[in-house]
Image (cartoon, helix red, strand yellow):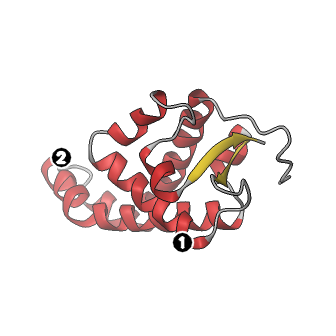
Amino acid sequence: MQNNTNNLQLASMRSRAFAYVIDDLLVTLIIMIIFWENIYAVSNDPDALMYLMKAELVMPLIVLKVIYHTFFVWYYGATIGKIVAKIRVIDANNWGRVNLFSSLLRAVGRIFSEMFFYVGFLLGFFNDGRKTFHDITGKTLVVNV
């Protein structure tokens, strides 16, 4: 990906939402593949399926999301969803590549945004940099490629 800072343009909330959907579908698919036997075993019992989802799948899902978002944002500057949406994450201070620690903070902030009714995502609609809670915690911006 290019690091041309002359023509940086903030990514739209629409393209960010599109990337979010792709990323969430990918991570969910991975979790379903990993835990397929457990899911299939209780698929005829809605109560057991709900228990499985709450008791056994929540933590692996959170851990996988943090690893996925941390690695892809740090290494590629974008998750698979962001690559498809043609957007990327940059450091808000120097407009360069996001370091590993900032990427981790951003990924954890994203989890908190999801846990609290997505309020952290709504912040992006109410500030000039379209910064969500996880952009603020990771000190990042999301821009078009």
- The residue sitting at 19% across, 63% down in the picture is 55
- x and y percentages locating residue 42 in the rendered image: 23, 57
Q: Where in the figure is residue 128, as x and y percent of width and height?
A: 55, 31
Q: Residues within 10 Å of mark 1 (few under 14, many from 20)?
A: few
Give the side of residue 9 with respect to residue 135, left or right. Answer: right
In this view, 111 is above or below 22: below
Q: Give the mark, 2 or 1, whose residue is nearer the N terminus.
A: 2
Q: In what element is the residue under mark 1?
A: helix
Q: Which one is nearer the viewer's eye here, 2 or 28?
A: 2
Residue 33, x across and y down, in percent = 47, 62
Please indicate whether residue 78 sits to the left or right of residue 114 in the image.
right
Q: Is residue 54 left or right of residue 28?
A: left
129 lies above or below 91? above
**Residue 137 lies in quadrant:** bottom left
Residue 65 visible somewhere in the drawing:
no
Can residue 131 be seen in the rendering of this structure? yes
- How far apart in space, not on screen, are marks 2 and 1 (Cα)? 40 Å
Front residue (pair 14, 38): 14
Residue 43 in picture, x, y percent from top left: 27, 52
What's under tag 2, amino acid-wise? Pro
Which disc number belongs to residue 101?
Answer: 1
Q: Quadrant of the C terminus?
A: top right
- Pair 2/1: label in front: 1
To which residue does mark 2 refer?
A: 46
4 relative to 73, above or below: above
